[in-house]
Amino acid sequence: MQSNKPAILVLILLLLCGGAAPTTQPTSAPRGGTEPYAERYRPQFHFSARKNWLNDPNGLVFYKGTYHLFFQHNPDGIDWGNMTWGHAVSRNLVGWTQVEHAIHPDALGTIFSGSAVVDWNNTSGFKAGPEAPLVALYTSAGGQNEASKGKPFTQSLTYSTDAGRTWMKYDKNPVVAHIRGDNRDPKVLWHAPTKRWIMALYLDGPDYALLASDDLKSWTHLQTLAGMPGTECPDFFELPIDGDAKNTRWVFWCANNRYVLGTFDGQTFTQTDGPYTLCDEKYCYAAQTYSDIPADDGRRIQEAWMRGAKVPEMPWNQQMAFPTVLTLRTITGSVRLCKEPIREIETLRTRGFHRKGVTLSPGGEVFDDFEAELIELVAEIEPGTAKRFGFELRGQRIVYDREAGALEHVACSSTKCELLNGRLLLHILVDRTSVETFIDHGRASTVDFVVIDPANRTLKTIVEDGTITLRTLDVYPLKSGWQ
Ligand code: FRU
């Protein structure tokens, strides 16, 4: 079993302070406004590792009030390498506590991406005490370290019997032998109608596979999904269409944000629609959704790696995108995935700036001297006659071009999105090194990694060639999620 010193220290601290013993890792441990989370460019409401490299979110699972975010991590360096599962916990998805790394490299390989589930029925037989076992499936990346030289990529299992605090590797690893190529990134889900586990696995080229298991330890091949619209990090889940639980589709997801829709009877996935693209992959990659969100919440919550660049002089490299909720909606007659920021962003809001029914011409301004650093902006815009309109937030331009039917964002990227109903709803999040925009409740969305000048706090409106009406404008300076 691996050591878990920080979690134990936090527990002792809580007990000394008279706090009740937590059932899961506490998230209210002091992280302070001081080092290491207050560095000049430290994202304040996006997860980043305390130090060193991070890429894909892994093992996203919710158990007894705690969200677990594992992540591809190099514990020893600022660049990719020595892949290990870092681990952070949260009670609200906006404030995180990084705890002891969960899975370390071994003789089967370094630890590549994967997923985690709560084994409520103890199908694995790992239960030992009051907690349901948490079980994670990951890739043992053979040949990536000295100890695993000459070994192929296989899939392995680790489990926790203490609510995710400590993790024990299964002694009969790997649980899925090498199939082909650098097969990797198992995403596991419970299929209730057939009462068994399903694994979506990346094979190689554009091919994936579905496997099934009764106990998470022994897996059989169900189907090869050839010619999918992407590679790596699959996700596979069912969603209602327009909120109708009786009318659902399965989403098969690839790391590049491309997906297909279909049906799944527990044995065979049959594609019905797609492929489609949810958002550009440049700064948003390898997303995965949480397992075991309680039914009374019911959200399909996704985290993605915001793959950016190293920010000079900072002790960490890379960050996560802001968590989003996925839904399937019918848009102009066809069913598409949409994503919106999770509502927990509201817990970070401070006193806002609100305007209603303001008509603006070129050069007109609503913000005057209003300034902010961490920004949530929600605007419903009636485009009127203007050809181009939008906002410039801390020097980052987000401009809708009517002729192009596209949103231009940050460094000249452009995302297609025709106007519907003559209105444009923009929901924009600005952190120290990112701008994320969600159009019409996530019908289209953009993620941009950008290092923003810390001194620039200005907000401006942009109106070109005509007028617009801001039907509503709500801007909330946000507080840090680290406090
Ligand atoms: C995706 C990916 C995965 C792999 C991991 C390694 O970004 O290449 O396929 O498991 O990163 O860090």
Image (cartoon, rainbow, N blue to C red):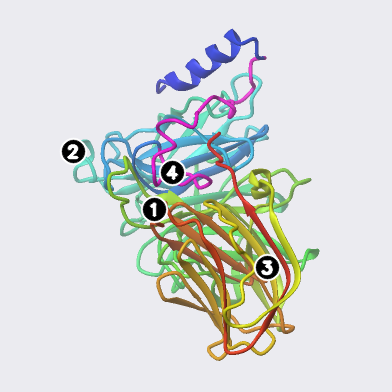
Horizontal and vertical percent position of residue 122: 63, 32
Which circle, 4 or 1, is nearer the viewer? 4
Q: Is label 1's Cβ within 8 Å of ligand 1?
A: yes
Which residue lies under the disc numbered 3?
379
Q: Earlier in the sequence, mark 3 or mark 2?
A: 2
Q: Is residue 88 above or below residue 404?
A: above
Residue shown at the point (60%, 65%) measured from the top left: 251
Q: How far apart are labels 1 and 3 at the CA level?
A: 41 Å
Q: Amino acid at mark 2?
A: Glu
Q: Are marks 4 and 1 in contact (CB under 8 Å)?
A: no
Query: Which is nearer the eye, 187 or 100?
Result: 100
Residues drawn in magenta:
20-49
Q: How far apart are labels 4 and 3 at the CA level?
A: 28 Å
Classify mark 1: helix, strand or loop. strand
Q: Amino acid at mark 3?
A: Ala
Which residue lies under the disc numbered 1?
184
